[in-house]
Image: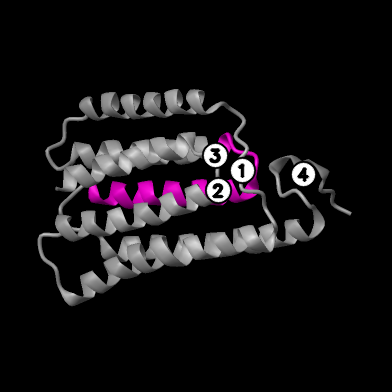
């Protein structure tokens, strides 16, 4: 069942690669949060109340509800158009995403470590690299925030790749870090939206230090 969920998670990356609407990105991020909840729930060998609360707080509450709602608010607040406006065509993005997944599979096959769960490792690295690719190939600043969220999901999965027990304190620290980062980027985006009508990375070249 865990493998099915991880494969579904990989499929969401392919879907984001060819998606054109920002709301689709937000919905996929929410879906990824739900998938991660069930992955961790099934992965933990022992579930106690504290672990379950932390899992739900980081995945369901934060990743699937708080951040998507905040990003939706940013879209409405800045009157951002629905199109993601990628630099590359969707077909090229799909090919590159496929290349990323294949490369991570090849890398995982070169690692000989019994404590490493290779499926988790492949999903984690693929997500990390795809997040970087998403940031590099999208014009709008808000898609960079979404790419950062994808990278954080990759770090989350990577923490599961090295053992059965989830390092709760580490992931709690990650959650607090990403919350602060998204909040700061959201405030930054709001300020940019007050100055420029089109919230695009191209507009950043017009900023000057007076």
Tag 3's secondary structure?
loop
Specify which label sits upstream in the sequence, 4 or 3.
Answer: 3
Residue drawn at the location 56% of the way across and 60% of the way down: 72
Mark with earlier residue (1, 4):
1
Q: Gap between marks 2 and 1, in whole Å?
A: 6 Å
Which element carries disc 2, helix, strand or loop?
Answer: helix
Instruction: Decide if residue 37 is in sight here.
Output: yes
Mark sitting on residue 83? 1
- Give the magenta part as a residue range: 135-161
Camera-side mark, 4 or 3: 3
In the image, residue 121 lies at what x, y percent?
26, 39
Q: Could you tell me how far apart the alpha carbons at marks 4 and 2 are, in whole angstroms?
A: 19 Å
- Cα separation between marks 4 and 3: 21 Å
| Callout 3 touching callout 1 (CB < 8 Å) | yes
* Residue 138 location (% of width, % of height): 60, 38
* 129 in relation to 153, above or below: above
> How many other residues sit within 10 Å of disc 2, few (<14), some (14-19) or many (≥20)?
many
- For mark 1, give the secondary structure: loop
Between the residue at mark 3 and the residue at mark 1, the CA separation in whole angstroms equals 6 Å
Q: Which secondary structure lies at badge 4?
A: helix
Check residue 22 in the rendering and tell me which mark sits there, or answer none.
2
Q: Quadrant of residue 161?
A: top left
> Image point 55% across, 59% down: which residue?
71
Mark found first going from the N terminus, 3 or 1: 3
């Amino acid at each position: 069942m865990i493998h099915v969920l991880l494969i579904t998670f990989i499929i969401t990356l392919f879907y984001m690669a060819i998606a054109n609407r920002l709301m689709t990105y937000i919905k996929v991020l929410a879906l990824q949060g739900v998938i991660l909840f069930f992955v961790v729930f099934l992965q933990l060998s022992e579930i106690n109340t504290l672990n379950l609360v932390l899992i739900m707080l980081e995945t369901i509450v934060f990743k699937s509800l708080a951040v998507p709602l905040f990003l939706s608010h940013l879209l409405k607040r800045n009157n951002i158009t629905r199109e993601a406006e990628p630099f590359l065509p969707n077909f090229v993005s799909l090919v590159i995403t496929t290349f990323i997944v294949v490369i991570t599979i090849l890398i995982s096959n070169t690692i000989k470590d019994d404590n490493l769960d290779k499926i988790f490792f492949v999903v984690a690295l693929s997500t990390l690299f795809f997040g970087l690719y998403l940031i590099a190939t999208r014009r709008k600043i808000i898609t960079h925030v979404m790419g950062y969220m994808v990278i954080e999901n990759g770090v989350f999965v990577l923490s599961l790749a090295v053992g059965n027990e989830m390092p709760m304190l580490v992931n709690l620290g990650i959650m607090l870090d990403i919350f602060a980062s998204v909040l700061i980027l959201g405030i930054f985006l709001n300020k940019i939206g007050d100055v420029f009508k089109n919230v695009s990375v191209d507009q950043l070249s017009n900023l000057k230090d007076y």
